[in-house]
Amino acid sequence: MSHASASSASLEAWHARYIAESAARAGAAVIRDRVDKAHTVETKGTNDFVTEADKAAQDAIVQVLRRSFPNDTILAEEQDDAVGSIADVSGRRWIIDPIDGTTNFMHGIPPYAVSIALQQDDAIVAAVVFNVPHDRLYAAVKGGGATCNGEPLAVNNADTLPEAVIATGFPYQRVAHTEVFLDVLGALLPKARGIRRHGAASIDLVRVAEGAYGAYYETGLKPWDVAAGALIVREAGGRVTTVGGSGGLHPLFDAQTVATNGRLHETMQDALAPLQHIHA
């Protein structure tokens, strides 16, 4: 790629980030308008819910993106063909979760977030995560660093588990591997400074990026749960892979995510080895 085309691609990604920020704010406005109100709730599966707020927020987000990028494709949680999505695309695709943490939102428990990422061919090139209750907007461009409300982000420098707070998510939809998860959690509990579970993967990821957590792990996630947060972690100096160490788009589409400050990555991979065969 020539220097000119590289610069052009970078400018396109920065522009995409700017529009994504506007889209996230549009979605957040819809969500805030529905806080503390009765919701129409549909069940998509075991402990998997969608409210009218999810759908309305997604419509608002897509409307903003479509105005600027009418030819881009979209992969969003609340669309009919979202299940079974493939990793590889040719061209540009927006990956959207209108409310990451729907159960939290339904019960008035922060955090919950809008998550928007732009995939260009085989890479995520722009990302936004908007923590709606706390009004914190995280954003990144590939090769351009990551910010929160305009301030640069950096992962922490914890070298060992006793120095680190770790975040995770529980397998609340499928219970076939519960014992393995509990074994791994039980082994980590006495080693880490603390374990947290907030119920919104995008928030857990950006908290790795800003240095609050040293690591985060979970299986069974969807691309829209991980896409934006993964780029933000990487641009803040962290690392995101599967348990086995595959990077790129694998943590998004292989339903297995390990995010760390980089220093703790091999330690976390070793601790999570029993989960390596679990993708649900």
Image (spheres, rainbow, N blue to C red):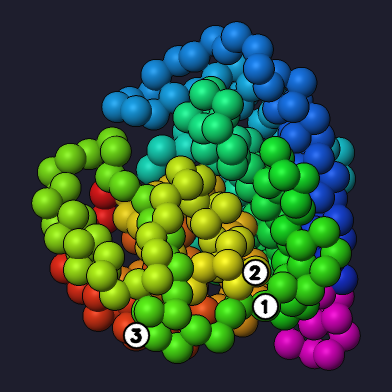
15 inside magenta stretch: no
Give the amino acid at mark 1.
Answer: Ala
- Rendering coords of residue 93 (x, y %): 64, 52
Q: Name the residue under label 1.
A: 154
Residue at x 82%, y 69% (from the top left corner): 151
Q: Is the magenta stretch mostly helix, strand or loop?
A: helix
Q: Mark 2 points at which residue?
A: 210
Of 116 and 191, the residue lying toward us: 191
Q: Are marks 1 and 2 in contact (CB under 8 Å)?
A: yes
Residue at x 40%, y 64% (from the top left corner): 194
Dot 1 or dot 2: first in sequence order is: 1
Give the amino acid at mark 2.
Answer: Glu
Residue at x 86%, y 75% (from the top left corner): 8
What secondary structure is found at the residue carrying circle 1? loop
Indicate the quadrant where residue 147 lies: bottom right
Which region shows up in magenta?
1-10
What secondary structure is found at the residue carrying circle 3? helix
- Rendering coords of residue 36 (x, y %): 66, 17
Q: Mark 3 points at which residue?
A: 266
What secondary structure is found at the residue carrying circle 2? loop
Quadrant location of the N terminus in the rendered image: bottom right
Residue at x 20%, y 62% (from the top left corner): 186
Whether 267 is drawn above or below 110: the answer is below
Of 151 and 186, the residue lying toward us: 186
